[in-house]
Amino acid sequence: MIMELIAIGAFAIILMLVIAFIYLRDRGILARLEAYERAIDDLNDRVYLLEKRQPESPDAIIEEFKKFQKELKSVEKELHERLDDLGDPILKTIRAVKEMESELERINQSINERIDKIEQTMKISSMSSAHANEKRIMELYADGLSPEEIARKERLPLGEVELILRLANLR
């Protein structure tokens, strides 16, 4: 019981640490994503201003669009790399938590099996002691003792002694 509580407490602490770690990592990721978002918005504003300032020559627009496309691709590539880097530790942490959960479940099953075995042993021992009392009472009655004397000697209630003798048809 104590080991189970300790295991559950340890699991809860580890789970809280994992959640705190994920929360802190998410805050960093969100800050980076906001920076990328601002950069993309800035690029969009620059494209808009360039379109407004420059005459509408197709070659200039195409060239500016290609530059914008390259910058956007580099930002996207960097974003994907960062997200991939962040995903690996989180996946490892999730796997570790799942392994801990399965270990706790195995421990819990083991403890339940042991409890069942102990309960069965206690039932068997209580049944054998009652049977031993019956034999002793019948032997004492056969030796000529009265039910009152048997009850005093064996420290059992008189009613129980009389019931055992009646069931054995000795009285």
Image: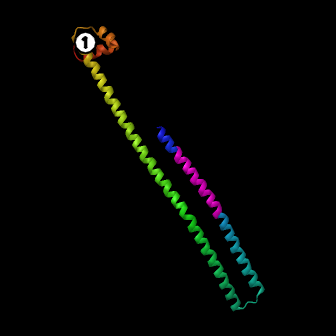
How many other residues sit within 10 Å of disc 1, few (<14), some (14-19) or many (≥20)?
Answer: some
Near-viewer residue (27 or 96): 96
Q: Which segment is the magenta one?
A: 9-29
| Main SS of residues in magenta | helix
- Say whether residue 30 is left or right of residue 141: right
What's the amino acid at mark 1?
Answer: Leu
Residue 135 at x, y percent in the picture: 25, 19
Vertical relation: 81 (above or below) 60: above
Give the residue drawn at x 65%, y 60%. Answer: 27
Give the residue drawn at x 27%, y 17%. Answer: 164
Residue 171 visible? The answer is no
What residue sits right under mark 1 in the picture? 140
- Say whether residue 134 is left or right of residue 87: left
Give the residue drawn at x 70%, y 71%. Answer: 38
Residue 21 occupies which quadrant of the picture? bottom right
Near-viewer residue (126 or 78): 78
Residue 22 occupies which quadrant of the picture? bottom right
Q: Secondary structure at mark 1?
A: helix
**Rendered-image quadrant of the C terminus:** top left
Q: How is the image coloured?
A: rainbow
| Residue 105 inside the magenta-drawn segment | no
Residue 43 at x, y percent in the picture: 71, 77
Residue 14 at x, y percent in the picture: 55, 50
